[in-house]
Image: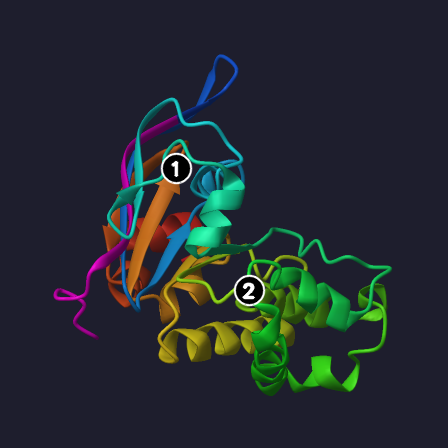
Amino acid sequence: MRDFSSAPPVLQIQRLHSHYGPIQALHGIDIEVRQGQLVALVGANGAGKTTLLRAISGVQPVSAGAIRFGGADITRISADQRVRAGICQVPEGRQVFGPMSIEDNLRLGAYTRPQSELAGDLERVYALFPVLKEKRALTAGMLSGGQQQMLAMARALMGHPKLLLLDEPSMGLAPLLIREIFRIVESLRDEGITIFLVEQNAHAALAIADVGYVIETGAIVLSGPGPELLDNEQVQSAYLGM
């Protein structure tokens, strides 16, 4: 287990509350992600995972509490400002631009970056995802589900994230593709990219996570090193079918 005790916090979520109208979706969430960590948030559908990611991205209002990024309070700044600060999200369901070419999708991910660095950034993500380079002139809608997930991840990486938010990257994929996607996530972590992974597939997520959190009905109920949570009886019975 890697030691992150001396690594600076990149993301600090402090007593965060959020509502959809009168309905409270998040109840006092506390989460910390340190530089270079892969932190996983697991839970069932409707537990509040995507709501939390939307709050971090700035598209879901916060009722109380704070979000700090690199030590600065970003709770009230716009989603666009958060992207420019270095928070890049891979959305649930991939949401690639189907009629546009793969390369144009990637260029959109780099809209905050200097144009002079675009060619180098493209080569970097093509090295990570060779299949995208092969097919770069095709429209994104012609890709398989797994390839679209790779494109969504590559598009986010084009923004040079200080924090990469991954929302349900395994959703709708076959088991073989899920293993490949999580292998890529691990390799990104090993490159030093700080990752906050939200995932319903608890086993796959916790197996590679430095730290894991379990969310139920909008509240964190368990946290600890990912592999230790895999051995937790409560997690095994609720999420792993054991």
Whether the residues at callouts 2 and 1 have beta carbons within 8 Å, the answer is no
Q: Quadrant of residue 219?
A: top left
Give the quarter of the figure containing the N terminus.
bottom left
Which label sits in the foreground, 2 or 1?
A: 2
Q: Residue 121, located in which quarter of the rendered image? A: bottom right
Q: CA distance from mark 2 to mark 1?
A: 38 Å
Residue closest to the eye, 216 or 124: 124
Location of residue 30 in the rendering, given as x and y in whole percent from the top left corner: 26, 40
Q: Is residue 152 above or below residue 122?
A: above
Point out which mark residue 113 bears.
2
The scheme the figure's colours follow is: rainbow
Which residues are drawn in magenta? Answer: 1-17
Q: Earlier in the sequence, mark 2 or mark 1?
A: 2
Q: Say if the magenta span includes residue 16.
A: yes
Q: Secondary structure at mark 1?
A: strand
Residue 234, compared with residue 67, is above or below; it is below
Horizontal and vertical percent position of residue 176: 63, 77
Q: Amino acid at mark 1?
A: Glu
For residue 46, side relative to residue 129 (left or right): left
Q: Residue 143 location in percent, x, y?
A: 80, 70
**Residue 139 position by quadrant:** bottom right
Label 2 Cα neighbours within 10 Å, binned few <14 / some 14-19 / many ≥20: some
Q: For the C terminus, which image quadrant?
A: bottom left
Residue 120 appearing in the image: yes
Residue at the spot of label 1: 216
Secondary element under disc 2, as helix, strand or loop, is loop
Q: Residue furthest top?
A: 22
- Looking at the picture, tell me which residue is in the foreground, 105 or 146: 105
Which of 96 and 170 lies nearest the eye of the viewer?
96
Which amino acid type corresponds to the residue marked 2 in the rendered image?
Answer: Arg
Q: State the residue at coordinates (53%, 44%).
A: 80
In the rendered structure, the answer to whether residue 120 lies left or right of residue 173 reads left
